[in-house]
Image (cartoon, helix red, strand yellow):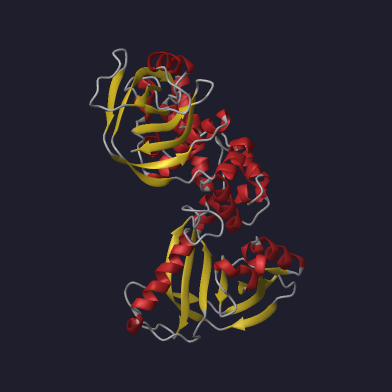
Amino acid sequence: MQPIEPVLRAVDYFERHLRAPALVAEAAEAAGYSLFHFCRVFNQVTSLTPFEYLMRRRLSEAAKDLTEQETRVLDIAVDFQFGSAEAFARAFKRMFEVQPNLARRTRYDARRAMPRLDADYLHFLERQKPDPYPVDLTALCLAGLMTIEEGWGLPSETLSTALFAETGQQANEPLWAVIYPSTGQEETRSLTFLGVPFDGLIAQPSALARKDLPAASAFCFSWPDNTQDQHFLLQYLYHTWAPHQNLNIRLVLLRGASSSQGQPQFDKLYVLG
Amino acid sequence: MQKSPILIDQPEMWLAGFNFFGDPFQLRGGWDEENEIGRLWQRFTRFCAEQSPLLPPGLEPGVGYEVHIQHLESSERGEFEVFTGYQVETCAPIPVQMGLKLIPSGQFAVFTLRGEEISADWDADIAAWLIENGWVSDYGFNIQRYDQRFQGMEHLQDSEVDVWVPVRLAGK
């Protein structure tokens, strides 16, 4: 594996040039590599090309400015080194699926934004190598509870406690979380369903809702134990993996079981586009 | 890397093959057959294997070239042209799917890379050697020459590759 420090020096160069002219060749120099080798190493470590990282960082910071300031779109475009408002709007739409003017009024999906890459995240990529494999999921019939969750939409303790109180869930019994990344509302919120498989032929417990998921093709990732790694995986999913697959994440499933402490413990994450 | 390269005067050379332009590591970084360079070689070798009757004869059987060419976008965006091919007669007729690349005549420093050196940052090592020894390479390309000494990506340890760098003496 490649050392991370040279890549972090290049990241530092890019961060200092988000609002100034930047050259990938100068980032390579900051890393201490030849240009060609730098491109090879940067992608090996980050799963992004250097120029892609620079552009995604510029657009992410520009998105913040759009929603937090009154500055004209054109001025923001120029500030972040885009040649014109049109070029900026095209790039912004590609990344956030919304025009800058609309993002200003209705906000944008911040999960698509690229944060500054740091050592912890890069070590996570090195450790986890989040390379999914395609799977065919069979149809699922679940009984459970649904709520609106903030951020990534991971089921909260309140939701799991309420579900386990209804189902009398025992340790090691299978459990699924179904996350709809967007509620269609302005804010970034997710609809999250937490449920247990049940035989659809018998009546579900009255306090629980039923959810039928048809058979579908999905991509499967290993779900890390560590909370920080879980967040890194979700970040990677939204700002790197899905754009590379040209995939709009429609549904995220987590598969697991209840732990002996009465907590959900997931081991697989499935993404459906 | 051998510290003292061999200097050669190379007449112009015509290569027939395939090219790619962009970031060669967009699909995957590192040394990986699934990055753009690996795929370029796969495309080239498959075409040569399946369309051999259409191909012009090679001047050096068993020898392949990989040319890295810098364009204006290289320093700005990290985008390069990569050309893989084999040497043919001047202006040899080629199938429409292929391209011809003229490598200009000139003086080249030939460095031999062995084992781990092949996947290391030899570009930087060569640049440092040239500066130290009063040479300049500002032609915007270099060439890797693969022959029977290259055993494949899985056997880099036992492999050798020659890198040709066009050079001139500093100040000339």
> In the displayed structure, would residue A213 be above or below residue A136?
above
**Number of callouts:** 0
Q: In the rendered image of this protein, does residue A126 appear above or below residue A106?
A: below
- Image coordinates of residue A156 in percent, x first then y, are 46, 19
Residue in the foreground of this view, choosing between A43 and A60: A43
| Residue B34 in view, yes or no | yes
- Residue at 39% in and 28% down: A176
Residue A123 in the image: state x and y as whole percent: 62, 40
B105 lies above or below A109: below
Residue B80 position in % (x across, y down): 50, 59
* Residue A92: image location, x then y, percent: 40, 35
Res. A168 image quadrant: top left
Quadrant in the picture for residue A196 = top left
Q: Residue furthest right?
A: B132
**Is B168 positioned to the left or the right of A163 in the image?**
right
Measuring 37% from the left and 23% from the top, which residue is drawn there? A195
